[in-house]
């Protein structure tokens, strides 16, 4: 079952704890997980998602603002919704609030970069780096990593420069990430060879 945010926002108050949903944000991020809470007034959806660490019995909690979601697909509807006799897991509101504020700051920096004319390659590379390194910001059209490395347009490995005296290891590490990003992009865009039918 798929809902489009513009048309079906009113339906989201029907989400039950335990429902499995996938969300696609307007920033191109995809999240899938189990609904643990939903605040209809603020349209904030709390999802318990598999941890990126890969550790068993460890989950990431995601706060998703449905105002920035293009669509939501209900993968599995809960058959026994949580009732008054069951309790939800305790949430660290202070920690979640801090994460939300940090996420807003990151998105604001991304918006500022887009409005300053950063290329699509720059934006995609920025998002790719943030999956590996948390401390990534914009300085005009330049990507700044860990306050040690700056990546200037057109954002290729040779455009990675140390800030100040810098750290050679940090520069080399960022260069490897950038190089892998462009190799993955080239591989994704290259036509896949078609398998030939076997003759009997």
Image (cartoon, rainbow, N blue to C red):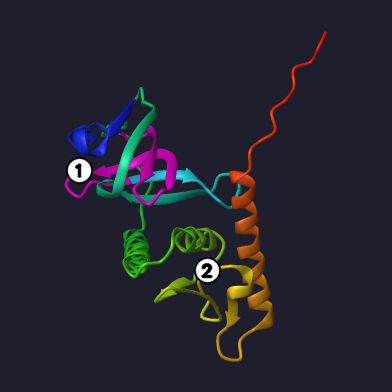
Q: Tell me, yes or no, whether the highlighted magenta stretch contains residue 29.
A: yes
Q: Secondary structure at mark 2?
A: loop
> Which image quadrant: the N terminus?
top left
In this picture, is 70 found above or below 118? above
- Farthest residue, direction top: 200
Asked which quadrant contains residue 87, the reply is top left
**Along the line of sight, which residue is nearer the eye, 76 or 93?**
76
- Callout 2 crowding tier (Cα within 10 Å): few <14, some 14–19, many ≥20: some
Give me the residue at 50% from left, 67% from top.
134
> Which image quadrant: the C terminus?
top right
In this picture, is 153 found above or below 49? below
Residue 103: x and y in percent read 36, 62
Residue 33: x and y in percent read 43, 39
Residue to which mark 1 is pinned: 40
Asked which quadrant contains residue 107, the reply is bottom left
Q: CA distance from mark 2 to mark 1?
A: 43 Å
**Along the line of sight, which residue is nearer the eye, 40 or 194?**
194
Residue 11: x and y in percent read 21, 32
Say if residue 47 shows up in the picture.
yes
Give me the residue at 59% from left, 67% from top.
156
In this picture, is 89 found above or below 107? above
Tag in front: 2 or 1: 2
**Along the line of sight, which residue is nearer the eye, 148 or 181?**
181
Q: Tell me, yes or no, whether the highlighted magenta stretch contains residue 66.
A: no
Give me the residue at 59% from left, 75% from top.
160
Instruction: Please provide the residue range marked out in magenta.
Output: 16-45
Give the main secondary structure, helix, strand or loop, of the magenta stretch. Answer: strand
Q: Secondary structure at mark 1?
A: loop
Say if residue 13 shows up in the picture.
no
The reply, left or right, for residue 127 in relation to residue 25 is right
Residue to which mark 2 is pinned: 154
């Amino acid at each position: 079952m798929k809902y489009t945010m513009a048309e079906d926002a009113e339906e989201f108050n029907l989400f039950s704890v335990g429902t499995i949903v996938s969300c696609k944000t307007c920033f191109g991020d995809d999240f899938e997980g189990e609904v643990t809470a939903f605040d209809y007034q603020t349209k904030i959806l709390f999802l318990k998602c598999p941890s990126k660490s890969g550790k068993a019995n460890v989950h990431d909690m995601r706060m998703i603002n449905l105002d920035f979601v293009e669509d939501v697909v209900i993968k599995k509807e809960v058959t026994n919704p949580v009732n008054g006799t069951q309790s939800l897991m305790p949430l660290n509101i202070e920690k979640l609030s801090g994460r939300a504020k940090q996420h807003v700051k990151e998105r604001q920096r991304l918006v500022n970069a887009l409005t300053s004319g950063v290329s699509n390659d720059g934006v995609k590379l920025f998002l790719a780096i943030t999956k590996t390194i948390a401390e990534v910001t914009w300085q005009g059209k330049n990507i700044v990593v860990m306050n040690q490395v700056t990546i200037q347009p057109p954002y290729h490995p040779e455009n990675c420069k140390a800030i100040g005296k810098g750290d050679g290891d940090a520069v080399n590490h960022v260069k490897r990430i950038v190089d892998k990003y462009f190799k993955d992009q080239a591989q994704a865009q290259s036509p896949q060879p078609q398998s030939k039918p076997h003759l009997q």
